[in-house]
Image (cartoon, rainbow, N blue to C red):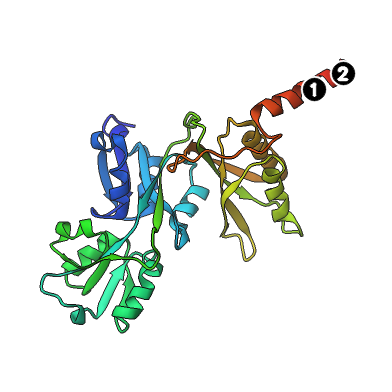
């Protein structure tokens, strides 16, 4: 990695995306070169190729769920790790060329994840408008500027970048919608524990049999580890072949989390550790009795005394 690439972060572009807005909330963003890329895979591949120190992408939306492009990139290809996360409130504006009235809007565009968040508004106000997806919300704004569409659903902050006007602001079908973004980099030591952390991993099941998913979940449950998210993604190996992307409360250095990951490694053919990092909401987990580090240590000491005949 060259000195210039060591200070470079890539993100889903072009300029004016929600991803860029979230990235700029990181304290170090002011000292980094922020480079827009055409896709999430391109942003991640820049890190894998040593052209950037980190890549920033949306991974989960409170309305639509997981962002498949990011989940799949983290599960496949050369390994990457998550080091930070950001939560960004999301509200859309309908961006149009100056002088456009609502009655003039016949075609609209936006990122596919945006559509479920404005579907009801569209049905109520533009029921006959034709939707076509774009690579990002900002890319949709750029295409409106070029005349390809009449309107784009994007962040209001993108209007000035593309010479557009926000015809309607604060559009969202669900109040308090948020998108979660992650900063990924080459594999390394996890971020130091803060007491309010999250651990992410991708897990592959060995074979399809009754109770296979239950066995995976029990590794977390018996150790008192709360799962914040679990969703399946196809592996590409045929119908019915899935891996599972999971987020768990806690840090890999917490005994309950570390032992759960070891349990998964014993029963699953493949486990990809994606990192332990601070939770953006700073909420500390409620640790159940019997699952604290002190109690794991006490139990290990008891076993040692039993093996030595000291009980």
Image side of residue 218 versus residue 75, left or right: right
Q: Quadrant of the N terminus?
A: top left
Toward the left, the furthest residue is: 99
Quarter-of-image position of residue 297: top right
The residue singled out by tag 2 in the image is: 311
* Nearer to us in this view, 58 or 283: 283
Image side of residue 97 versus residue 111, left or right: left
Task: Point out the tag, 1 or 2, that comes first from the N-terminus.
Answer: 1
In percent of width and height, residue 175 lies at 38, 62
Rendered position, 290 above or below 88: above
Q: Is residue 261 visible?
A: yes
Q: Which disc, if any, is residue 90?
A: none
Toward the bottom, the furthest residue is: 128
Rendered position, 123 above or below 39: below
Alpha-carbon neighbours of circle 1 within 10 Å: few (<14), some, or many (≥20)? some
Residue drawn at x 67%, y 52% as measured from the top left: 205
Image side of residue 169 versus residue 115, left or right: left
Quarter-of-image position of residue 183: top left
Proximity of marks 1 and 2: CB atoms separated by less than 8 Å: yes
Mark 1 secondary-structure assignment: helix
Residue drawn at x 10%, y 74% as measured from the top left: 99
Alpha-carbon neighbours of circle 2 within 10 Å: few (<14), some, or many (≥20)? few
Give the total number of marks visible in the rendering. Answer: 2
In percent of width and height, residue 62 lies at 45, 58
Q: Quadrant of the C terminus?
A: top right
Residue drawn at x 64%, y 39% as measured from the top left: 261
Q: Which disc, if any, is residue 302?
A: 1
Measured in 3D between alpha carbons, the distance from the residue under mark 1 to the one under mark 2, in whole angstroms, is: 8 Å
Mark 2 secondary-structure assignment: loop
* Nearer to us in this view, 141 or 101: 101
In percent of width and height, residue 223 lies at 69, 39
């Amino acid at each position: 990695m060259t000195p210039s690439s060591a200070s470079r972060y890539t993100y889903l572009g072009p300029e004016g995306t929600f991803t860029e807005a979230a990235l700029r909330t990181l304290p170090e963003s002011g000292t980094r070169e922020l480079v827009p890329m055409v896709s999430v895979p391109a942003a991640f591949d820049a890190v894998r190729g040593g052209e950037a120190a980190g890549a920033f992408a949306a991974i989960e939306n409170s309305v639509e769920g997981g962002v498949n492009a990011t989940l799949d990139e983290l599960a496949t290809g050369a390994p990457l790790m998550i080091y930070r996360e950001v939560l960004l409130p999301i509200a859309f504006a309908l961006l149009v060329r100056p002088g456009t009235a609502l009655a003039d809007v016949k075609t609209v565009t936006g990122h596919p994840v945006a559509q479920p968040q404005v579907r009801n508004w569209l049905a109520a106000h533009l029921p006959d408008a034709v939707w076509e997806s774009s690579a990002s919300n900002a890319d949709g704004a750029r295409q409106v500027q070029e005349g390809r569409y009449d309107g784009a659903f994007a962040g209001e902050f993108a209007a000035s970048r593309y010479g557009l006007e926000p015809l309607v602001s604060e559009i969202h079908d669900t109040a308090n919608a948020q998108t979660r973004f992650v900063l990924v980099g080459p594999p390394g030591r996890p971020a130091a524990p803060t007491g309010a952390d999250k651990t992410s991993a991708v897990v592959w099941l060995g074979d399809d049999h009754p109770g296979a998913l239950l066995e995976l979940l029990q590794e977390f449950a018996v150790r008192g580890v709360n799962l914040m998210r679990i969703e399946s993604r196809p592996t590409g190996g045929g119908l019915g072949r899935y891996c599972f992307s999971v987020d768990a409360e806690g840090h890999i250095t917490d005994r309950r989390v570390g032992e759960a990951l070891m349990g998964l490694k014993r029963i699953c053919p493949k486990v990809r550790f994606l990192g332990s990092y601070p939770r953006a909401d700073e909420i500390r987990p409620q640790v159940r009795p019997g699952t604290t580090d002190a109690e794991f240590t006490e139990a290990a000491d008891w076993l040692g005394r039993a093996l030595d005949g000291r009980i």
